[in-house]
Amino acid sequence: MPAINVNLPAAQYRITIEPGALERLGELSRQAAPHDRALLVVDNAIAESHGKVAERSLQVAGFDVATVPMTANETLKTLQTVQRIYSVMLAQRLERSSPVIALGGGVVGDVAGFAAATYLRGVPVIQVPTTLLAMVDAAIGGKTGVNTPLPEGGLGKNLVGAFWQPRAVICDPQVLSTLDVRHLRCGLAECIKHGMIGDAGLLIAIEQDAGKLLAHDLDVLTSLIIRSAAVKIGIVQEDERESGRRALLNLGHTFAHAIEPIAELNLHHGEAVAIGLCAAAKTSSLLGVCDDAYVQRVEGIVSAVGLPCRIEKSVPTAQLMHAMMYDKKVVDGKLRLIIPVKPGEARIVENVPQEIVEQAWRQVGAS
Ligand SMILES: NC(=O)c1ccc[n+]([C@@H]2O[C@H](COP(=O)([O-])OP(=O)(O)OC[C@H]3O[C@@H](n4cnc5c(N)ncnc54)[C@H](O)[C@@H]3O)[C@@H](O)[C@H]2O)c1
């Protein structure tokens, strides 16, 4: 059974990546968090399909399970939803060792993880990611959280949260058969990012198998998940709390956060990250760090999986620069960016000159 162990100073857990693992959820959950009661938080979109398989498996393994369905939507990734989960936890009389099982994409994982981190000052959570993005990224590393209304209006993304490592992560690549190709592509953006920061071979694999990946080929997807998750695990093991190397995982994200909220662009997170990866590569080339051939290669991989390299509508560079300065990763108004160096290697650069970033924005289509 393909499993990777995560070893952190205060937590050790196993990530199982195996077609059919959902059928064994009960048994695997029992090994990770033995108790007689459990709470299953499930994405509404898959409650009737994968949710039922999960529920049955948990019951067969002897859990008395209560289920909370939730809609995976950023506007519902809030403390109100967490409150709703607490109510069911109380009604189910969950105790300190009763596990919460999060079955869904990153939204469900973050919300259920945060509820688990805070209920009774922390109960076990088992992450069962059902999107590619969550399998290779969100479910690994213990970040949980919700969005919060900002004083100036709108929602601040992931501003309230906790580090809460899961007891286990259980990935069944078969569940991706129901995921639409647009969301599959969004997960591929994070896989490309992982290749760029830590595994040059992963980039070659994506280049070679782009067609099979988009066709939901189970074997190719499974090896991609194993390889991509390994990059995130490696980084989290070195830097659990993002005091150093973990920041590399933000490659492309400071750019992405500037364009993602622009409604007219209609970009999903992974699509914004794809443009962000191209912009980060352009920045690197403008700084004389990576060569142009690598920039073109990144654009080629992004395009090969059907992700955008450029902003398709006119957006003023000044607006994007303003948004970037408000990103929570910006320290003291100084632009700190992650830039690619060569395949499999990226670096943190402090004080990137604004003119360079402006130029990079224009090269990816900003006006
Ligand atoms: N905690 C972390 O480290 C971390 C890292 C990256 C992203 N995130 C968070 O993750 C979220 C994004 O995650 P996401 O892309 O998984 O989004 P998501 O949870 O919104 O899922 C995307 C869509 O896919 C649907 N879906 C999920 N699984 C499905 C399946 N198997 N079949 C069919 N449909 C399915 C959902 O209903 C939803 O419509 C964001 O809120 C982001 O902040 C967290």
Image: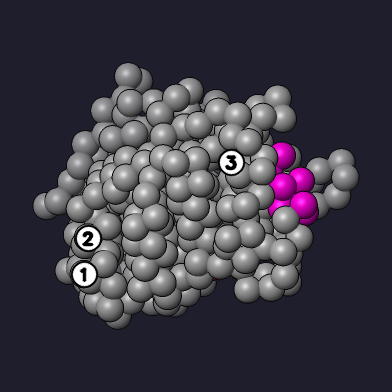
Main SS type for the magenta part?
helix
- Highlighted range, magenta: 318-325
Q: Is residue 348 above or below residue 3?
A: above
For label 3, the residue is 145
Q: Estimate the spatial distance between the alpha carbons at disc 1 and disc 2, rounded to whole Å.
A: 6 Å
Residue 102 visible in the displayed image: no
- Is 323 included in the stretch rendered in magenta? yes
- x and y percent of residue 99 in the render? 41, 41
For label 1, the residue is 208
Q: Quadrant of residue 22?
A: bottom left
- Is 132 included in the stretch rendered in magenta? no
Helix, strand or loop status at disc 2: helix
User: In the picture provided, is 171 more to the left or to the right than 299?
Assistant: left
- x and y percent of residue 26 in the render? 28, 53
Is there a contact, CB below 8 Å, between mark 1 and mark 2? yes
Q: Estimate the spatial distance between the alpha carbons at disc 3 and disc 1, rounded to whole Å.
A: 36 Å
* Quadrant of the frame with the C terminus: bottom right
- x and y percent of residue 259 in the render? 66, 58
Is there a contact, CB below 8 Å, between mark 3 and mark 1? no
Number of marks drawn: 3
Q: Is residue 194 above or below residue 240?
A: below
Q: Residue at x 33, y 76 (%)?
A: 214
The mark lying in front, picked from 3 and 1, is 1
Classify mark 1 as within 8 Å of ligand 1 or not, answering yes or no.
no
